[in-house]
Image (tube, rainbow, N blue to C red):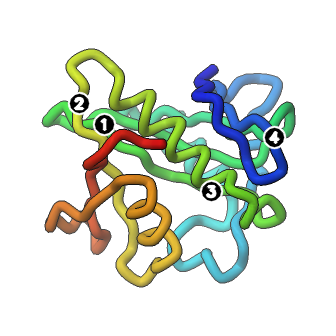
Amino acid sequence: MIDAGHSDRAGRRVTLRPVDDDNWRAVADVAPRDDQRAWVPALAARYLLLSDRGDVWTSLAVYADETVVGHVMWGVDDDGSHWIGGMVIDAGEQGRGVGAATVSTLAGWLAARDGHPPVRLSYHPDNTAAAALYTRLGFGPTGAVEDDEVVAELTRPPR
């Protein structure tokens, strides 16, 4: 379990846990709001398959206290940078600070790994909500673009 002590606005502790036999169905069923479908899949199940069928990504279940409320994954690039990807917070859980707590928790954990690797993520330039969140959490655009997405790197420690 990855626990940085972050809570959502309701005071629920946000933790990241391995996807396992007990929670994978709840994680697979996580669905974003309809207006976010241009940037994320309809269900987190797609991200679980990417983690399961490839060797790049590791999926994590996002918990608020003891309830699965989302999915996020991380991976290591050939240059040693660590990436955050595939974040989906369930539609009914959005607007409560779960996404911010998730990114802060994972970014801090990744940045503290051996060698203190760069931590990166990407987002579609039209996804202004994601851009604002990531900027607030200390990520800045690198100038690079990957798969039509802006690449951002953690420039200051996450809160």
State the residue in front, 13 or 123: 13
Of the numbered discs 2 and 4, the one sitting upstream in the chain is 4
Which residue is located at x 68 percent, y 56 percent? 97
Closer to the eye: label 3 or 4: 4
Q: Are marks 1 and 4 in contact (CB under 8 Å)?
A: no
Callouts 2 and 1 close, C-beta under 8 Å: yes
Of the pair 22 and 98, the residue shown nearer to us: 98
Asked if residue 8 is positioned above or below residue 76 in the image, the reply reads below
Q: Are marks 3 and 1 in contact (CB under 8 Å)?
A: no
User: Which residue type does callout 1 highlight?
Assistant: His
Report x, y in % for residue 29: 78, 52
Q: Which residue is mark 1?
A: 82
Q: Is residue 92 above or below residue 35?
A: above
- The spot of residue 147 in percent (x, y) is 28, 67
Q: Type of residue at label 3?
A: Val
Query: What is the CA distance from the residue labelled 2 to the residue labelled 4?
Result: 29 Å
The CA distance from mark 3 to mark 2 is: 24 Å
